[in-house]
């Protein structure tokens, strides 16, 4: 018996591969069926329309990245218990999950950029696009508040610094996806490390 959730995930993976390789414009029920090595009737059984398929794939992409971030967040000891000279490094590992630094993250970030651009003209994706934007700011704010709670670092205004950090991450991700020969993974990490070093300057 075919497991419905596994089949949906299999189809979503096909969407991600297609969108990363050929762009979101290449995604259709027919092309996804071919990529997933299924007949189009099987795809239609789980997704009534291309819109349903794209929304499910975007949701899956967001959830996968969020799950990795959550694992990293849980692995980081309370910042008050971390040696000061390790805080910036641990935060770099956390926020690096939002950058296209390996094949998995590059595929996800490439597809996410495609979805975010498409959401400007597809109302059914706009709420997910807003969720992505809010999520990065919210994560940044929580980290900044945790840093402030230690009393060990220079105080920052989270209303300014959270959107600033989110904008830095978004900008690096977009540049690395769109022009990887110009904005390399090494450059992304160097910029992120420099910014986090400033945010974790001792009081």
Image (cartoon, rainbow, N blue to C red):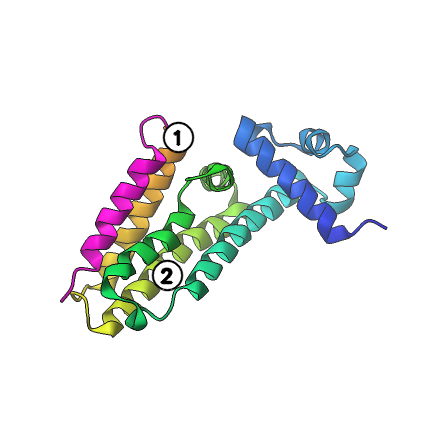
Q: Which residues are magenta?
A: 180-203
Would you place residue 114 above or below residue 167 in this image?
Answer: above
- Relative to residue 15, is residue 155 drawn left or right? left
The residue shown at (67%, 47%) is 9
Q: Position of residue 167 (x, y in %)?
A: 30, 48
Q: Secondary structure at mark 1?
A: helix
Q: Please report the residue visible at 47 percent of the width from the left and 61 percent of the height from the top.
A: 70
| Relative height, residue 41 to residue 141 (above, below) | above
- x and y percentages locating residue 96 in the rendered image: 38, 48
Q: Residues within 10 Å of mark 1 (few under 14, many from 20)?
A: few
The residue that mark 2 highlights is 138
* Disc 2: CA contacts within 10 A as few (<14), some (14-19) or many (>=20): some
Magenta segment includes 105: no
- Residue that lies at the very extreme toward the left in this rendered image: 203
The residue depicted at 37 percent of the width and 40 percent of the height is: 173
The dominant secondary structure in magenta is helix
Q: Indicate the position of residue 33 as horizontal and vertical percent values.
A: 72, 33
Total labels: the figure holds: 2
């Amino acid at each position: 018996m075919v497991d419905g959730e596994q089949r949906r995930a299999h189809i979503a993976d096909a969407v991600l591969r297609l969108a990363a390789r050929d762009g979101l414009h290449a995604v259709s029920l027919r092309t996804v069926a071919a990529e997933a090595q299924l007949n189009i009737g099987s795809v239609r059984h789980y997704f009534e329309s291309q819109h349903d398929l794209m929304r499910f794939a975007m949701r899956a992409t967001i959830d996968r990245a969020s799950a990795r971030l959550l694992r990293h967040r849980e692995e980081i000891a309370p910042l008050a218990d971390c040696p000061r000279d390790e805080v910036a490094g641990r935060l770099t590992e956390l926020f690096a999950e939002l950058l296209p630094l390996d094949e998995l993250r590059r595929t996800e970030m490439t597809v996410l950029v495609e979805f975010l651009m498409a959401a400007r003209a597809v109302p059914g994706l706009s709420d997910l696009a807003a969720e992505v934007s809010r999520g990065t700011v919210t994560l940044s704010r929580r980290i900044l508040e945790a840093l402030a709670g230690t009393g060990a670092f220079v105080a920052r205004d989270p209303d300014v610094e959270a959107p600033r950090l989110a904008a830095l991450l978004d900008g690096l991700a977009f540049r690395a996806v769109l022009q990887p020969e110009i904005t390399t993974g090494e450059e992304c990490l160097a910029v992120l490390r420099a910014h986090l070093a400033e945010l974790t300057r001792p009081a």
